[in-house]
Amino acid sequence: MPKKEKSEEERTWPPESAREHLREARAEMRETIRALFPPAFLEHRRAARRELLLAARELIDDALERTEVG
């Protein structure tokens, strides 16, 4: 018995409908966070996240350098 061709939505994971729900949930959560915390807290959180990303970049750069030497 031949296999039935899957639709584009069936081939993508997660399905587009689930992605849309996730986008909407994320937007609602962001609005909730903005309503609960003062702007200074949100700015501090943003700065802390940036520092974490910079630290991760340094770790990756260091690991890459160690693989190139030797």
Image (cartoon, rainbow, N blue to C red):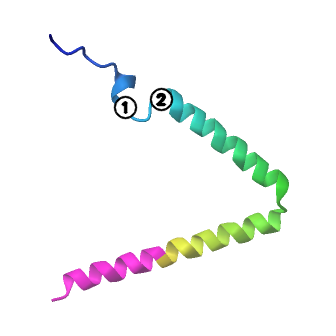
Q: Is residue 62 magenta?
A: yes
Q: Which residue is mark 1?
A: 12
**Residue 26, horizontal then vertical, whole percent:** 64, 44
**The N terminus, quarter of image:** top left
**Residue at 37% across / 31% down in the picture?**
12
- Residue 31 vertical position relative to residue 4 in the rendered view, above or below: below
Magenta stretch, residue numbers: 56-70
Q: Which residue is mark 2?
A: 16
Q: Relative to residue 3, is residue 39 drawn left or right?
A: right
Q: Relative to residue 50, is residue 5 drawn left or right?
A: left
| Amino acid type shown at disc 2 | Glu
**Residue at 33% across / 19% down in the picture?**
7
Q: Relative to residue 21, is residue 36 drawn left or right?
A: right
**Residue 64, horizontal then vertical, whole percent:** 28, 78
Residue furthest bottom in the image? 70
**Residue at 83% across / 51% down in the picture?**
35
| Amino acid type shown at disc 1 | Thr
* Label 2 SS: helix
Q: Which of 35 and 39 lies nearest the eye of the viewer? A: 35
Instruction: Give the crowd class for mark 2: few <14, some 14-19, many >=20 residues within 10 Å.
Output: few
